[in-house]
Image (spheres, helix red, strand yellow):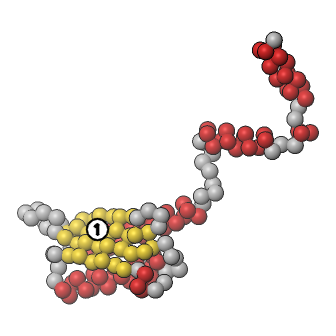
Amino acid sequence: MDELDFAIEFHTDALGELEERALFGEADTRLRERLAAGHDDITGAAITIRLPAHGTTPPLYEATVVVYVRPENVAAIKQADNPVAALKGALDAVERQVRSKREKLRQRWERPSGDPVIQEMIEVAAAESAPAEDLDITDLDQAEAARNEDNG
């Protein structure tokens, strides 16, 4: 994947420049090497770290990570008493969501067995494609007799 195709936006108003660079490096490594490697579904990410409210004791940092992934974006928000823990928690949550989404997309051929509408569609399709020798003639005769009674 070309780096130009995968942009990461990083915003914070609660950290110094050195801390910000270190956290951006951590997020960049995890998103590119652990999550996007070998896949082309991720198109970018946005990360925000902030102090949500003044006067809270202890001060909590809030990390929001949004990963732009096809077909639907995923997001996670985590709070912790330090920015590193908040970011790592949000990245962990996003990784779980993306991996789960990929697994579901791989298994889209599986249908829920308890859905009555899908079950009926499968039965109708099977009945329409059944060979004529599998049909029970007595059932057809009874159905035809019932139709004749309704019409006659």
Residue 112, image x, y percentages: 60, 48
Q: Is residue 132 above or below residue 43?
A: above
Label count reads: 1
Secondary structure of the residue carrying tag 1 is: strand
Amino acid tagged 1: Thr
Drawn side of residue 123 relative to residue 118, left or right: right
Q: Is residue 69 above or below residue 20?
A: above
Packing grade of label 1 (10 A; few <14, some 14-19, many >=20) is many
Drawn side of residue 99 relative to residue 59, left or right: right
The residue located at (23%, 72%) in the rendering is 49
The residue located at (40%, 64%) in the rendering is 73
The residue located at (32%, 69%) in the rendering is 65
Residue 11, image x, y percentages: 23, 76
Residue 127, image x, y percentages: 78, 40
Looking at the rendered image, the quarter that the C terminus falls into is: top right
Depth check: give the residue in front, 115 or 80.
115
The answer to whether residue 107 is seen in the rendering is yes
Q: Name the residue under label 1.
A: 64
Q: In this view, does 48 lie above or below 16?
A: above
